[in-house]
Image (tube, rainbow, N blue to C red):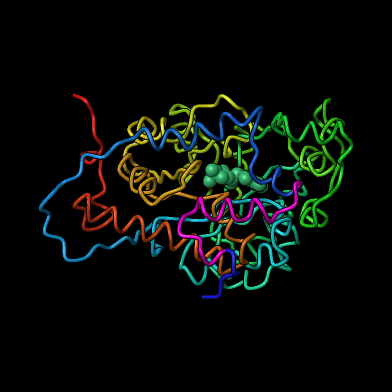
């Protein structure tokens, strides 16, 4: 694998983060790293995984471990997928094409964002690969239908409806940039699949230009009826991303969703949302084992992946970590980040006495009682 010189020394996800924080423009760094308010939600997401502790099983007699998983009949090399992140060309000129390339090399699942930096048809290698499409419902539902149709024509295997961003999050650093008139568009934000239309948020004029484009397509009127329509009109599975409550999750499954992604949008929407790590076990308990439950937010180590599976996730997604890899070294950087997490996970499985991902269960999580 080819790394950039600086990235070659990166051994952990955190190394990639600090390497690219010196490399990215200030605009790109703020867009990527910050969250709602003063970033407390971003930090809490990571911290919550640290607070979960293992109760490792010893003398398990393991010769080797198998980190693969099966979801809906598909086999993946490891339970680590790539979350939808908009405008990837803001971080590397190969943007979404690099993500698709890395996903193929890692045998990992990518979710391609509605707000991709190039139209779906221009993403190299997309047709014919195994991918899911993330949908923000546009105020003009006809545009959403057209976008879903083009995703399906290009072979999307599932639709992921994001429900946790009715309006753009109130992000202090974005707003500071706007009021200081640092209103530049990042390279990846010029040619999204979605055109820009009207503003829903009265405060939108105080957002930087690229955030206003996003705000113009988000629709606070999104409701259960939209989810019902999407499920009724689709032949592919529908997943709901951005769920934090067990009653919501159960409703969506009862309405026909194939599963949920527990997420608070990486802390970018509501600063004080509960962190996904804390609510995962409760949601899994409410849904039982039939539904597919996935999680993202704050996963930075292979041990976090193992914790998520022990607490009931079928699979996890990473957002910022792979983008740090992308910014450092394109597709090979994405692959390197994936492989760091995978190696850490596999090492952790030996310590836990878990032969395969099915054996990562709740009994391995420490409780005081
Ligand atoms: C720069 C950036 C852009 C994002 N864009 C989208 C998006 O277009 N659609 C979406 O559903 N989630 C989006 N997300 C949220 C991610 O899908 C994911 O929920 C989050 O990044 C997970 O947290 P993590 O970054 O701590 O891994 C974005 C996140 C970041 C950091």
Q: Is residue 289 left or right of residue 263?
A: left
Rendering quarter of residue 102? bottom right
Is residue 11 covered in magenta? yes
- 38 in relation to 339, above or below: above
Q: Is residue 47 left or right of residue 20?
A: left
Q: Residue 138 in the image: x percent, y percent?
A: 75, 42
- 287 in relation to 230, above or below: above
Instruction: From the image, give the main secondary structure of the stretch colored magenta.
Output: helix
Asked whether residue 201 appears in the rendered view, the answer is yes
Q: Residue 275 in the image: x percent, y percent?
A: 48, 31
- Judge by depth and name the residue closer to the eye, 28 or 219: 28
At 84% from the left edge and 49% from the top edge, which residue is drawn? 185
At 22% from the left edge and 52% from the top edge, which residue is drawn? 351
- Judge by depth and name the residue closer to the eye, 108 or 304: 304
Q: Residue 131 in the image: x percent, y percent?
A: 55, 62
Is residue 119 covered in magenta? no
Rendering quarter of residue 242? top right
Rendering quarter of residue 229? top right
Q: Which residues are magenta?
A: 7-27
Total labels: the figure holds: 0
Asked whether residue 231 appears in the rendered view, the answer is no
Q: Residue 287 in the image: x percent, y percent?
A: 37, 35
- Where is the C terminus found, in terms of image quarters? top left
């Amino acid at each position: 694998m080819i790394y950039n010189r600086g990235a070659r020394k990166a051994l952990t996800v955190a190394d990639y983060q600090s390497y690219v924080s010196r490399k990215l423009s200030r605009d790109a760094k703020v867009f990527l790293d910050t969250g709602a308010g003063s970033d407390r939600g971003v930090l809490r997401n990571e911290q919550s995984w640290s607070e979960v502790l293992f109760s490792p099983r010893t003398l398990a007699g393991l010769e080797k471990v198998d980190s693969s998983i099966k979801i809906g009949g598909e086999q993946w090399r490891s339970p680590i997928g790539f979350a939808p992140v908009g405008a990837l060309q803001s971080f590397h000129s190969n943007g979404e094409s690099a993500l698709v390339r890395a996903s193929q090399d890692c045998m990992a699942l990518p979710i391609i964002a509605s707000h991709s930096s190039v139209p779906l048809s221009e993403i190299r290698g997309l047709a014919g690969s195994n991918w899911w499409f993330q949908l923000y419902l546009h105020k003009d539902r006809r545009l959403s239908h057209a976008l879903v149709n083009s995703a399906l024509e290009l072979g999307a295997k599932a639709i992921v409806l994001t429900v946790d961003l009715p309006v753009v999050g109130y992000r202090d650093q974005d707003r500071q940039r706007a009021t200081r008139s640092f209103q530049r568009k990042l390279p990846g934000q010029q040619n999204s699949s979605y055109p820009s239309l009207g503003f829903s948020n009265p405060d939108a004029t105080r957002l930087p230009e690229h955030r206003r484009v996003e705000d113009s397509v988000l629709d606070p009127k999104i409701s259960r009826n939209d989810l019902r329509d999407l499920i009724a009109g689709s032949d592919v599975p529908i997943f709901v991303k951005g769920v934090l409550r067990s009653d919501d999750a159960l409703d969506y499954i009862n309405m026909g969703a194939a599963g949920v992604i527990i997420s608070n949008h990486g802390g970018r929407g509501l600063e004080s949302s509960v962190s996904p790590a804390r609510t995962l076990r409760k949601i899994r308990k409410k849904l039982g084992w039939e539904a597919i439950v996935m999680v993202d937010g704050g996963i930075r180590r292979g041990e976090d992946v193992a914790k998520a599976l022990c607490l009931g996730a079928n699979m996890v997604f990473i957002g910022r970590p792979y983008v740090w890899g992308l910014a450092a070294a394109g597709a090979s950087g994405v692959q390197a980040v994936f492989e760091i997490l995978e190696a850490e996970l596999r090492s952790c499985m030996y310590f836990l006495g878990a032969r395969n991902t099915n054996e990562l269960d709740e009994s391995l999580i420490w409780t005081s009682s």
